[in-house]
Image: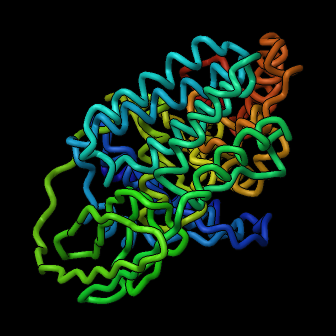
Amino acid sequence: MNQRFKYYRLMALALLIVSSPAVSATAISVAIVPIKDNLSDDESESLTHPFNKALSLEGLNVVSQEKVEAVLNYHKRDPENDKVREAEISIAKARQSYYDFEYERANEQIKKAVELLESEPQLISDGGRVLRDAYITGGVIMAAEKDAGALAEDYFAKALRIDPQYELSRKTFSPSVLNVFNAAKNKILNHPLGSVEISSDPKVAKVFVNGIQKGVTPATMPDLPEGIYNVSVRANNYKSVEKEIIIRGHETSKLNFKLQWAYSQAKEAAALSDDAYTQTVEGVRAADLLKVDKVVLIDADEKKNGSGVITVRMVDREFRASHHPVIVNHSADEKAYVNNLAETAAIIAKQAGINILDNAEKHLDAKGTGDPIILGKRSAGFSKKPFLLMAASGVLAATIGALASAGSGGAENNSSTGSVHVQFK
């Protein structure tokens, strides 16, 4: 794209946004992250700054792009963790099948995720949380089937062996599911309990037990059932250290880690796929690293003639799920482009303030469902009638399309005018 044109475009967008009133007073924290897929990556990155400004003016607490770049460059994606990511995708598919009442397919997908992670026990330090979530999801799925209570309890017990302090939300799960979960937890905690005290040099290093962050050093982990646990300690610019320990009942183990300085330039990250599952996983990873509530992913795919598609997707850290992405189809018309990117920023700001648990199926992208807690909010009437979902999506697309039309002078169908279409995917 012509550099002068790009500069004008971004300055115009920023000026338009500056003149827009803030519509929110929330303290939700957000980070803007460009998608690096080896296609128009420079354009994706250049859009992060005006979106940062736009969402800040909408009342959100937006992390500076300098900090985002510094943190994500330090924690480059590790291609060796592809098996963990593949398991996360299988879990997401299982949850969607559960939403659609396709229990057999959901169970197959959960089995695939579990087999991927159980096949290599050394993955526990990186994939412990994912394996725990796979077991929890499997338990919820089995609890929905007749005469499968024992299988559900077994799934829950395996999850609790990884994370004995895990709790299911009483606000979102039915009493029948909670009863099975609590039965499993009572059996696990009925064993003799021990504890471990963990310290490190330097202090304030992150502590992970079976791949799940439990605080920072110095830390004490109480009420751990007897057994073997993987403990790892990590700090920026230091080599991570991990160790297997045996917890014995009524005893306190003590671990002291001496971390070695090991700063080096991280390996170049592999190009990220534009697949919804992969982007959701990457968004959650970025949210965890930056410790923000939401991550906004921006992916620009441009053509030589100045037209192209921009996809903006918000990912929620708590529920590890993606909102419906907003799509901007544009050509070379500058005014329409700027107007509709400003409208997109307003839509994303509104998504940030949505209470997902009010209606998870309505607010979340079906391809990016995440944390097991949202399984408890499944709506039978909505899931059973796909045509209702399609109709609702059509209304949303039509509404945003009308806004886009207003912003581009109403020239929707004449490509020569450089129209821009904004819609939900």
Position of the C terminus by quadrant: top right
Image quadrant in which you'd find residue 246: bottom left
Q: Residue at x 25, y 89 (%)?
A: 202
419 horizontally vs 216: left or right = right
Residue 301 position within the rendered picture, expressed as x and y whole percent measured from the top left: 39, 33
Q: Residue at x 73, y 17 (%)?
A: 147
Q: Nearer the viewer, residue 208 or 271?
A: 208
**Image: 378 above or below 263:** above
Q: Nearer the viewer, residue 81 or 61?
A: 81
Position of the N terminus by quadrant: top left
Q: Residue at x 12, y 79 (%)?
A: 260
Image quadrant in which you'd find residue 95: top right
**Image: 322 above or below 308:** below
Image quadrant in which you'd find residue 308: top left
69 horizontally vs 60: left or right = left
Q: Is residue 8 visible?
A: no
